Amino acid sequence: MATEVLMHFGPNALRIFANPDDDTLDIETVKWNQDVETVTQERMPWAMFMGKPFGWGWVAINQQGYCDSILFSFNDAYPQLALTVVASEIKISAVMRIDLPVRIVGSPE
């Protein structure tokens, strides 16, 4: 059960942790501790992003106004990784972009 994720960015890390009081995600910047046990480099979806530069980050607010998800992009500008808290546990998902044709309603075909 994952309740905390550390994402290493140079000398610092993002500490993302589940708040069990309201099932939200909290984020803080911390100094990277090389003694922290890591199991991410070979595991999916993390392996897809190792060594790629951080691009963008977003927070997602649910219908009740709580921040329960965070999205990240690496080497691009669209979301590729999502962290979502469900029942005080952080669920990690890869996000897949699908390019669909767009038709604006009311425009000529």
Image (cartoon, rainbow, N blue to C red):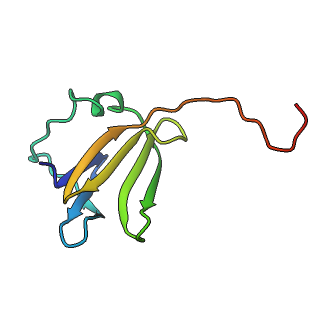
- 64 with respect to 87 (left or right): right
Please provide percent x and percent y for residue 62: 42, 63
Can the viewer see residue 74 in this picture? yes
Question: Measured from the top left, where is residue 29 in percent x and y?
Answer: 30, 62
Q: Which quarter of the rendering shows the C terminus?
A: top right
Residues 108 and 54: in front is 108
Residue 62 vertical placement versus 11 (above, below): below
Residue 13 appears in the picture as rendered:
no
Q: Is residue 25 above or below residue 84?
A: below
Judged left or right of residue 34, residue 99 is: right
Q: In this figure, what is the number of numbered marks?
A: 0
Residue located at (14% from left, 36% from top): 39
Residue 100 vertical placement versus 91 (above, below):
above
- Pick the residue in front: 94 or 37: 94
* Quarter residue 18 falls in: bottom left
Say which quarter of the image contains residue 23. bottom left
Q: Residue 84, how many percent across, how many down?
A: 31, 52
View extreme (front): residue: 106
Residue at left 20%, top 35%?
40
Query: What is the x, y in percent for residue 47?
Result: 29, 28
Residue at screen point 25% across, 71% down: 22
Please name the residue shown 23% across and 51% down the image. Answer: 90
